[in-house]
Image (cartoon, coloured by chain):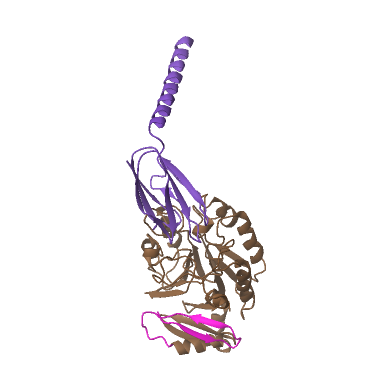
Chain colours: A purple, B brown
Amino acid sequence: MKNRYRTLLLAILFTAATGQAQDKKAATQNPKPAPVEIKIDNFSFTPPTISIPAGTTVRWTNRDDIPHTVVSDDQKFESKALDTDDQYSYTFNQQGTYGYFCSIHPKMTGKVVVQ
Amino acid sequence: MNEAKGRTRAGTKDLIRYDHNHDGLDRRGFLKCMAWAGAGAFCVLRGGVLHSYALGGLREADAKGELSFVQISDSHMGFNKPANPDVTTTLQVAIDKINALPRAPEFLLHTGDISHLSKPSEFDTVDQMLKSARVKDTFFVPGEHDVLNDDGRQYRERYAQRAQGGGWYSFDKGGVHFIGLVNVLNLKAGGLGDLGSEQLEWIEKDVKPLSKSTPIVVFAHIPLWSVYPEWGWGTDDSARALGYLKKFGSVTVLNGHIHQVMQKVEGNVTFHTAMSTAFPQPKPGQAPSPGPMKVPDEQLRSVLGITEVDFLQGSHALAVTDQTLG
């Protein structure tokens, strides 16, 4: 019994290690896309909608005198309250459309389309 | 919206914006009445018509049920941008105004945005300062700035330990039933302020045993009426809350959030928003966003203020008066 568990554990570890190696290989072949900036100004996200390749890091900067947050509709990502000039970054690795909003001023909404 | 300004005998400036949809309210009479207030008279608004009572003429039964309280809002302790680099001083001026009122208010309502960034030190400063206000009690409801990063946990520990759910509660004073509501939690993308079903059910139960002649005061941070939804100045499910209050003859709704005085009367409900003690915000739609509005330094105190509310038992109406800080 004990041996069977050990074999199973080794198999899992091996799979994980190979997976990691493959990820590294993919990253070398496709250099990381340039980061994208979104400005928070006048109670809005600018640009409100962006389209980016997978792996892109998006950085939000609050330019208002009032704090804002960046929270995805499905709560996959969520910043703390950003005071003036504070920044928040998130890297989008998976394809899909991500709606987000400011949880303090929910009229403020934006969208990230990851291709 | 019409606006009237006048000077009381004490030399302080009163700001009254009280146009109830062209209801023929005699504004000049109102101002005259407000001028009397400092000299010992009460002004009561009933069904959009103003009544004033000289103190000596009050029947004993009426005088017995007198209740006076004061509302302040949006202190934004910690804010330090050009619209007001010193919000501590303006809050102190507001407290001084409260302490100088001709009739000491029974208690103080703070309708939220006590702090700017929910920092413990910001709450501490306000708590310390409010100790010098000559009132017997202080009641709070949270603004969105008071519940940052922790869904309001710190706020509730400080101000609402005995409250329900997200921090809502009710109490009775001088024959008036007060309901403090929370509409700044669990906000939905694209939406406005939100009360939520748990709180709405609680409101229904809370007011059920009350007789319809009980005057009701509801206070919450974000307006419970649609002031300007484009800027988020409204509450998505407020209609349901107000529905539970339909049977009552007198309902007064006190809000903050928009840093300016707005008033509306709808049936038996009077809606009123207070000025901030920190900085003004633009009139709806008259700026690219509702952010802090910079006015010339010498004008700042004329756009900040406190709100005084008087109630006379038997009148089933509350008089709401705004006073600027300078």
Magenta segment, prevailing SS (helix, strand or loop):
loop
Whether residue B66 can be seen here? no
Give the percent coordinates (x, y) of residue B50: 45, 84
Up/down of B314 relative to B88, above or below? below
Task: Between residue B35 and residue B189, name the one nearer to us.
Answer: B189
Task: Report if residue A9 lies within the magenta region.
Answer: no
Task: Between residue B97 and residue B289, name the one nearer to us.
Answer: B289
| Side (left or right) of B7 relative to A38 | right
Which quadrant is home to the N terminus of chain B?
A: bottom left
Task: Report if residue B5 lies within the magenta region.
Answer: yes
Going 65% across and 65% down the picture, which residue do you hit?
B129
Which quadrant is home to the C terminus of chain B?
A: bottom right
Up/down of B100 relative to B27, above or below? above
Give the percent coordinates (x, y) of residue A70: 44, 50
Task: Between residue B93 and residue A51, name the one nearer to us.
Answer: A51
Give the percent coordinates (x, y) of residue A110: 37, 52
Whether residue B245 can be seen here? yes
Give the percent coordinates (x, y) of residue B23: 37, 83
Up/down of B47 relative to B210, above or below? below
So how many labels did they put on this image? 0
Task: Between residue B192 and residue A51, name the one nearer to us.
Answer: A51
Going 43% across and 75% down the picture, which residue do you hit?
B263
Q: Which residues are magenta?
A: B1-26
